[in-house]
Amino acid sequence: MWLQRIDTKIADLRKREAEQEQGRKNRPLKPEWIVELGIGNGRPPIEVHAGGCYAAGKRRRPVPRDEARRLLTSGVRACTHCKPDAQLRILD
């Protein structure tokens, strides 16, 4: 009886580990650049961040490198923590 319980627990743990590993493999890649969006009509972009920036807000979307450069040169603010303007080599 105890042996069956132990075997069942081991099987459950192995199944859970396999599911977690599959989740890690299927997780989408972190975006290279993020634009933080404002509140209101049209949700205008307010700040550009590097993909892994901890200071990015919840209202955001991934953008390609060219769009991040275009947004920064058009006057959208660069994050002061991750400094995407320096990483993209955009001078004031």
Image (tube, rainbow, N blue to C red):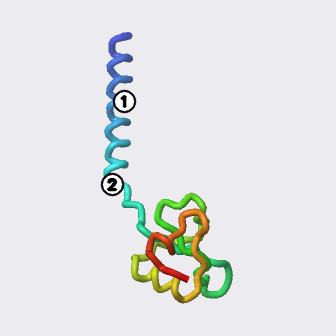
SS of the residue at dot 2? helix
Q: Nearer the viewer, residue 43 or 16?
A: 43
| Amino acid type at mark 1 | Asp
- As drawn, which residue projects farthest toward the right? 40
**What residue sits right under mark 2 in the picture?**
26
Image coordinates for residue 67, horizontal then vertical, percent: 44, 82
Q: Residue furthest front?
A: 91
Q: Is residue 21 above or below residue 54?
A: above
Marks 2 and 1 sit apart, C-alpha to C-alpha, by 21 Å
Q: Name the residue located 53 percent from the left edge and 74 percent from the top edge.
A: 35
Q: In this view, does 51 lie to the left or right of 27?
A: right
Residue position for label 1? 12
Earlier sequence position, callout 2 versus callout 1: 1
Residue at 37% x, 60% y: name it.
28
Residue at 31% x, 50% y: name it: 25
Q: Is 58 left or right of 5, judged from the image as shown?
A: right
